[in-house]
Image (tube, rainbow, N blue to C red):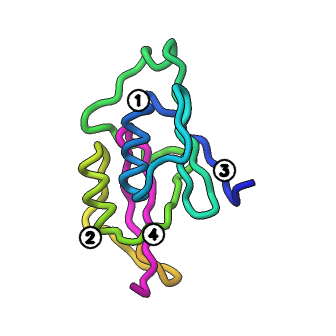
């Protein structure tokens, strides 16, 4: 069993899976028509396709409107915020500039967003 198992619903599962593969630097460990499973260390992020009859009732703006008032924000350990910043932008998401980074308990942090506007946080160990 993973240390943490999170499920994130996706309107465009392939685009979301490409984004998370790019920012995590590795492909999903499993994909099918309804899910894409990405491992982050000992934790698992499962992207689950929103059923078509629900997905067709809303649109995702380009660029997406950020869902900054959501009740949850995922934090992902990464090797390099700079690499993630570039990968996020190239795969339909984004990451705030370096002036929005902060340090806490031995890591550097910055917020970003995926192609559907879910706000997430990237953490890079400061000892690099």
Q: Is residue 60 magenta?
A: no
Residue at mark 4 to residue at mark 1: CA–CA distance: 25 Å
**Which image quarter is the C terminus in?**
bottom left
Q: Residue at x 49, y 16 (%)?
A: 52
**Mark 4 / mark 2, whichever is N-terminal:** 2
Dot 1 corresponds to which residue? 12
Element under label 2?
Answer: helix
Position of 92 compared to 42: left or right? left
Question: Crowding near pointer 1: few (<14 within 10 Å), some, many (20+)?
Answer: some
Q: Where is residue 93 in the image (x, y as percent from the top left)?
A: 31, 46
Which residue is label 3 attached to?
Answer: 5
User: Residue at label 2?
Assistant: 98
Up the image or down, 31 lies above or below 123; here it is: above
Inter-mark Cα distance, 2 to 3 = 29 Å
Specify start and end residues of the magenta stretch as a single range: 109-128
Q: Is mark 1 on a helix, strand or loop?
A: loop
**Residue tagged 4:** 123
Q: Nearer the viewer, mark 4 or mark 1?
A: 1
Q: Residues within 10 Å of mark 3 (few under 14, many from 20)?
A: few
């Amino acid at each position: 069993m993973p240390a943490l198992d999170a499920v994130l619903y996706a309107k465009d599962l392939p685009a979301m899976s490409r984004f998370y593969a790019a920012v995590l630097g590795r492909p999903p460990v499993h994909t099918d028509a309804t899910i894409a499973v990405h491992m982050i260390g000992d934790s698992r992020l499962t992207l689950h396709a929103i059923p078509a009859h629900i997905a067709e009732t809303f649109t995702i703006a380009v660029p997406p409107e950020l869902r900054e008032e959501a009740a949850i924000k995922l934090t992902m350990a990464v090797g390099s915020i700079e690499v993630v910043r570039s990968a996020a932008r190239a795969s339909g998401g984004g990451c705030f500039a370096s002036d929005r980074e902060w340090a806490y308990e031995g890591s550097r942090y910055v917020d970003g967003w995926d192609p559907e506007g879910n706000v997430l946080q990237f953490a890079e160990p400061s000892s690099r």
